[in-house]
Image: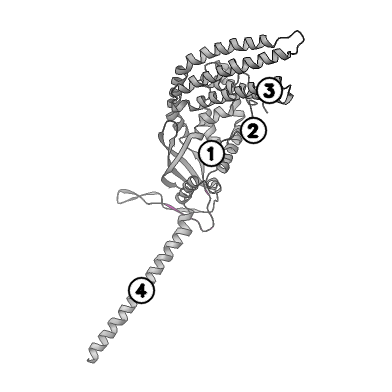
Amino acid sequence: MDDYTWRRRLSERRRRRERERLFVLSFFLLIFGAIFFYFAVYTKTPEYAMREMVTAYKAGDADTFRRHVDLNSVTLKAYDDLTSDLFKYDTQLSDRERSLFENFYVLIRRQMCNGAVKVINTYLDTGEWTLPGGILKGRQLGIDYDILLDRSLIRHTSLIDLESVEIHDEEATATFSVVEEYTQAPFTLKVTLKDLANDSFNIGGKEFEIFGRKIKFPGFSLNFGGSDWKIVSVDNYRGYLDAVSPILRQNLAEYIDNTAEIVYRYNNLFEAEQSTFITMQRSPYGIMTTNQRAEVSSYITNTIIPSLEERQAELDQVPIPQGAQFLASLRQESTRVTIMAWQSYIKGITENSAADLDTAASLHKQELVFDQRIEEIVHNSAVARNLPELP
C-alpha cells in the first residue's frame, strides 16, 4: 500500500469517527432537549394540565382533579347561569313574587355556591352525591337543594375527553366533550383557564402578517418556576342547560301525564283510608283501648300498606323516560319511607313503645319532604311559597 492510499484511508476513518461522534452527540442532545422541553415547557402548559385533569377524573384521583379546577370561581359563574331562569317555569308565582325571589337568590349567591363546592368535594372524595347541610339543610333558604342539583345536571353529566386547548395571551381556553347521561345528549363545553401561579410567560399563539398573508404561530407557555393552570369558568354552561333541559322537561311532562290517572285514583283512595284510620283511633278517654290498637294495626297491615304497595306497583309498570328518573325515584323512596313509618307506628301502639312511635314520626317527616319535592317538580315550582329571612 503506497503512502497516498494509506493517508486517504486514515482520513476517511477519522471523518467516519467524527460523524459517529456527531451523531451520538446529536442523539443525546435531542433526547436531552426532548426531556427539557417536556419537563420545563410542556408540563407547564394548559394542555398538559387539562390532560392530567381528564386522566385524574377517569381514575378517581380527586386531589389531582381539584388541582386544576378553581371550584369557587366555577360555581359562582355557573350559579348565575343556572338561576337565570330558575323561576321562569314556576306558574304559581306572581310577577312581584318572581322579582322578589330573583333578588333574594342574588343575595344568597355566596352561601349557595359554598354548598355546591362542598357537594362536589364530597363527591370527588367518596363518589357519593350528598347534600351540603348547614344553612342549606331543609328549606331555610326557601329552596330544596336536591332539586337545584338535579336541575344543574351536574350529577348526571359525564366528561368524555379533552378536545382542544388554545392560548390567548395570559389566558387559555379548552373544550371538552361531555354527555348528559339521562338523554345521552352530547355537548362540547368550553372553559377558560388561568395560570394562577403568575410567574410564566407565553411565546407565540398570535397572528402575524407576512407578505400580505396572516400566519398564526402555535403558542406555548414557558415557566421555569411553577405553573398552576386552573379552570376558572365554564363559558357555555348556560348553552348546555338550554340544550338539555328542554328534553328533560319534555320527558318529565310525558311521565307526569302517563301517571296522572294512577296518582289521582290512589290519592282519593288514600284520603278515604286516612279518614277511616282517624275514625278508628277515636276514644272518649283519648287513649286507644287494646281492641282498638289491634283493629288499627290490622287495618294498617291489611289495607293501608297494601294500597301503597299496589300504587307503587302500578307506577313501576309505567315506562320511565330518562328525564323523569329523578321524579320516579322520589316516588319510590316516598312509598318506601311511608311504609316504614306505618310499620313503626304499628309496633309502637301494639308494644307500647315510645321509641318506635318517635321513629314513626321521624319517618313521617321524611315522607313529607319527599312529597313536597314531588309536588314542586310536578308543578314546576322553584321555591317555597314564603320568602325566607336572610341568614
Q: Amino acid at mark 4?
A: Leu
Tell me, for residue 74, which label it has, or none: 1
Residue 104, x across and y down, in percent: 61, 25
Closer to the camera, 348 or 145?
348
**Labels 1 and 4 touching (C-beta < 8 A):** no
**Labels 3 and 2 touching (C-beta < 8 A):** no
Residue 300, x across and y down, in percent: 62, 17
Residue 142 makes an appearance in the image: no
Q: Which residue is mark 4?
A: 22
Q: Is residue 270 rendered to the left or right of residue 345?
A: left
Q: Is residue 219 above or below residue 284?
A: below
Mark 1: which secondary structure?
A: helix
Q: Amino acid at mark 1?
A: Val
**Labels 2 and 4 touching (C-beta < 8 A):** no
Which stretch appears magenta? Answer: 217-229
Residue at point 47%, 48% (across, down): 55
Q: Earlier in the sequence, mark 1 or mark 4?
A: 4
Inter-mark Cα distance, 3 to 4: 91 Å
Q: Indicate the quadrant where residue 8 lies.
A: bottom left
Q: Earlier in the sequence, mark 3 or mark 2?
A: 2
Closer to the camera, 248 or 261?
261
Q: Earlier in the sequence, mark 3 or mark 1?
A: 1
Residue 11 makes an appearance in the image: yes
Q: Amino acid at mark 3?
A: Lys
Q: Which residue is mark 3?
A: 347
Q: Indicate the quadrant where residue 358 lies.
A: top right
Residue 302, x across and y down, in percent: 59, 16
